[in-house]
Image (cartoon, rainbow, N blue to C red):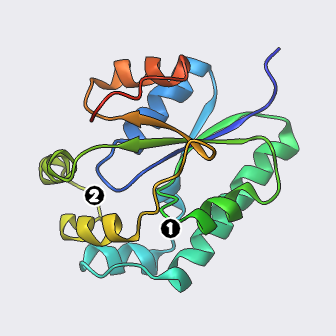
Amino acid sequence: MLPRMITIVMGVSGSGKSTIGEALATRLGQDFVDGDDLHPPANREKMARGVPLDDADRQPWLEAIVATMDAYRARGASLVLACSALKRRYRDFLRSGHDDVAFVYLHGTRELLAERLRARSGHFFDPALLDSQLATLEPPGDDEALAVAIGPAPAEVVECIIRAGCREAS
């Protein structure tokens, strides 16, 4: 039996966190939680207006994510979770001293990310915030996350994650 694990699929908006996270969870037979669903209404409204979140806005959201992870830990269940986790201190907070958290960093070019955001409909995130997210992003090092390029099809990206590799150019 595999040990219980919490996998956080991270990256800026448009990187495919929800798509890849859900597909990875299905492939692993685990639950999937989209961190966007845990944002307080005020955060969603702010982003919809094109206003970037600050650390104070993000803190209750990060706390809700940790509470969700703790609920899965209490049940002894694994989980795949999508969360931007843009800064190292956010990732450290999400780890909260637990050794059962693994990050998968989805990365791509600004052009590819912007193209994906323009094609997306029905999402509260204003595509104009991409540059703000890229400016906030502290890309994780190899010691922190498995980096996977988002250029290939989602099924291929999931297989790269399963094989714990695929560091090709985005």
Looking at the rendered structure, the kind of residue marked 2 is His
Which disc, if any, is residue 18? none
| Residue drawn at x 29%, y 65% as measured from the top left | 125
Say which element carries label 2.
Answer: loop
Left or right of residue 166, residue 97 in this image: right
Left or right of residue 165, residue 150 in this image: left
Q: Mark 1 sits on what residue?
A: 39
Left or right of residue 154, residue 40 in this image: right
Residue 126, compared with residue 121, is above or below; it is below
Report which quarter residue 160 is drawn in.
top left
**Quarter of the image with the N terminus in it:** top right
| Residue drawn at x 52%, y 59% as measured from the top left | 85
Which residue is nearer to you in this view: 115 or 165?
165
For marks 2 and 1, give the CA distance.
13 Å
| Residue drawn at x 18%, y 52% as measured from the top left | 121
**Upstream in the sequence, badge 2 or badge 1?**
1
Looking at the rendered structure, the kind of residue marked 1 is His
Q: Mark 2 sits on what residue?
A: 123
The crowd level at tag 2 (other Cα within 10 Å; few <14, some 14-19, many 20+) is few
Residue 2 appears at what percent x and percent y? 79, 19
Say which element carries label 1.
Answer: loop
Residue 11 appears at what percent x and percent y? 42, 51
Residue 137 appears at what percent x and percent y? 41, 63
| Residue drawn at x 35%, y 44% as measured from the top left | 107
Residue 33, compared with residue 20, is above or below; it is below
